[in-house]
Image (cartoon, grey):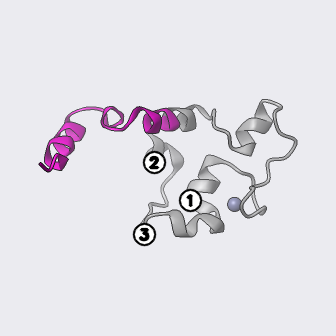
Amino acid sequence: MNDFPRFYEACKARDYLQCLPRSDAVQIFRARAKHTLLLADRARHGWSATTACRLCGEREETIKHVLSECREMVGDRPSGWPAKPMNEILW
Ligand SMILES: [Zn+2]
């Protein structure tokens, strides 16, 4: 049985995070709170000496850079990925 219509309706009626697996929802909460394992967040806590992106090395490794800017992630982004501010993507 195809559960997609039921899930889709549930997502429209409630916070969409409740429709995600717990592990995915946790990652979104961490991104919102800037408590990720990205180097910019780790450096803020003194856990990393560098903030340079580990993929391209060109910019600071932030959630915005990895999700929207990093050239090494281009192939992993869905086509038409929105170039919106992070607060509109994460919230
Ligand atoms: Zn990068």
Q: How many marks?
A: 3
Labels 1 & 3 near each other (Cβ < 8 A)? no
- Which residue is labeled 1 in the image? 68
Q: Is residue 34 above or below residue 40?
A: above
Mark 3 neighbour class, 10 Å CA radius: few under 14, some 14 to 19, many 20 or more: few
> Residue 61's spot in the image, x, y percent?
71, 51
Residue appearing at x 62%, y 35% in the figure: 34
Mark 1 neighbour class, 10 Å CA radius: few under 14, some 14 to 19, many 20 or more: some
Left or right position of 74 against 19: right
Indicate whether residue 29 is drawn in magenta.
Answer: no
Residue appearing at x 58%, y 31% in the figure: 33
Secondary structure mainly formed by the magenta segment: helix
Q: CA distance from mark 2 to mark 1?
A: 10 Å
Q: CA distance from mark 1 to mark 3?
A: 12 Å
Label ID, residue 79:
3
Write down the region rendered in magenta.
1-28
Q: Quick one: SS at disc 3? A: loop
Label ID, residue 38:
none
> Residue 64's spot in the image, x, y percent?
60, 51
Label ID, residue 89:
2
> Residue 26's spot in the image, x, y percent?
49, 32
Q: Amino acid at mark 1?
A: Ser
Nearest to N terminus: mark 1 or mark 3: 1
Residue appearing at x 71%, y 38% in the figure: 41
Nearest to N terminus: mark 2 or mark 1: 1
Q: Amino acid at mark 3?
A: Ser
- Label 3 CB, ligand 1: below 8 Å? no
- Label 1 CB, ligand 1: below 8 Å? no
Q: Amino acid at mark 2?
A: Ile
Nearest to N terminus: mark 2 or mark 3: 3
